[in-house]
């Protein structure tokens, strides 16, 4: 067989496999400084919000919160996405904390009771689906020239085709990075204003950093593998 002779079927198959792999199907290009950069040039910032139980408030407090929430919705000049995730309670870090402190207990009776408590929590953690918790997030979008509504309101089919046709070359990557540099401060301004409004609603909010964003995305796309993976370190 000559140097220029090769199996064309293998080359064609390789191209097909790489055209529709998992990375190609995701709209995410990268995560930088806690901000998700999409393949279409859009930016997404994610706030984690501590939930508020309105039923525990008295009538006057409920009315104040509801009126403030109405003002918040009327003030919004850009779209947001409210994400609610149902997930099981992960006790891994808490168990690690308990086991480390177990070594420092000298009293045998207390140590035995502590060990029984850890064993019980390990049993609960191994059940995984026994205890559910809710996580609340607010996703903040930003596009160059503030074309948020125009980009977000595109049809799902149009977005899907754009993802399939997105080809990362040097020019595209450089253009996305330039857009990120120009728009980073603007999306951070939206973050700060939203955090202030949420605080007025008696709900604390914090911006996810790069490690937290990657961890959240991994849990969303790989829920069964999440517990076996180490946390991303930036």
Image (tube, grey):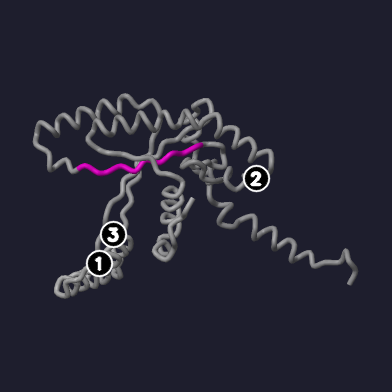
- Indicate which disc residue 89 carries: 3
**Nearer-N-terminus badge (1/3):** 3
Q: Which of 103 and 81 is in front in this view?
A: 103
- Would you call the spot at circle 3 few (<14 residues within 10 Å), some (14-19), or many (20 or more)? some
Above or below, comparing residue 228 to residue 76 in the picture: below
Residue mark closest to the camera, 2 vs 3 = 3
Residue 39 placement: quadrant = top right
Q: Distance between the residues labelled 1 and 3?
A: 27 Å
Give whichever of 126, 138 is nearer the camera.
Answer: 126
- Nearer the observer, disc 1 or disc 3? 1
Q: Residue at the spot x=22%, y=28% of the render? A: 68
**Quadrant where the image shows the N terminus:** bottom right
Task: Left or right? Give the position of 172 relative to 126.
Answer: right
Distance from Cα at disc 2 to Cα at disc 3:
38 Å
Asked whether 58 falls inside the magenta stretch, the response is: no
Label 1 to label 2, Cα distance in Å? 54 Å
62 over 93 or under it: above or below = above
The residue furthest front is 106
- Mark 1 and mark 2 lie on one chain; the one further toward the N terminus is 1
Q: Position of residue 93 (x, y in %)?
A: 32, 60
Snapshot quadrant of residue 120: bottom left
Image coordinates of residue 98 in percent, x first then y, are 26, 64
Q: Which percent across, then down, holds residue 148?
A: 47, 31
Q: Give the range drawn in magenta.
A: 43-52
**On screen, residue 60 above or below 87:** above
Residue 46 painted magenta: yes
The residue that mark 2 highlights is 168
Name the residue that disc number 1 marks.
Answer: 104
Image side of residue 100 versus residue 46, left or right: left
Closest to the observer, 90 or 102? 102
């Amino acid at each position: 067989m000559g140097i220029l002779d090769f199996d064309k079927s293998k080359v064609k198959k390789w191209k097909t496999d790489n055209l529709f792999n998992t990375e190609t199907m995701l709209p995410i290009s990268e995560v930088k400084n806690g901000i998700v950069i999409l393949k279409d040039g859009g930016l997404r910032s994610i706030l984690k919000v501590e939930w508020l139980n309105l039923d525990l408030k008295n009538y006057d407090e409920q009315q104040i919160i509801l009126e403030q929430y109405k003002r918040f919705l009327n003030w919004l000049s850009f779209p947001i996405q409210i994400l609610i995730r149902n997930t099981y309670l992960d006790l891994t870090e808490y168990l690690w904390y308990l086991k480390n402190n177990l070594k420092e207990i000298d009293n045998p009776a207390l140590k035995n009771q502590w060990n029984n408590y850890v064993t019980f929590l390990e049993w609960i953690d191994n059940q995984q689906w026994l205890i559910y918790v809710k996580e609340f997030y607010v996703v903040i979008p930003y596009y160059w020239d503030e074309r948020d509504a125009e980009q977000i309101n595109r049809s799902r089919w149009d977005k899907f085709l754009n993802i399939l046709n997105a080809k990362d070359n040097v020019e595209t990557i450089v253009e996305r990075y330039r857009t990120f540099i120009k728009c980073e401060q603007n999306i951070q301004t939206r973050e700060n204003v939203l955090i202030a409004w949420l605080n007025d609603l008696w709900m604390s909010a914090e911006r996810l950093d790069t490690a937290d964003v990657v961890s959240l995305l991994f849990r969303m796309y790989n829920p069964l593998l999440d517990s076996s993976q180490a946390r991303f370190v930036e």
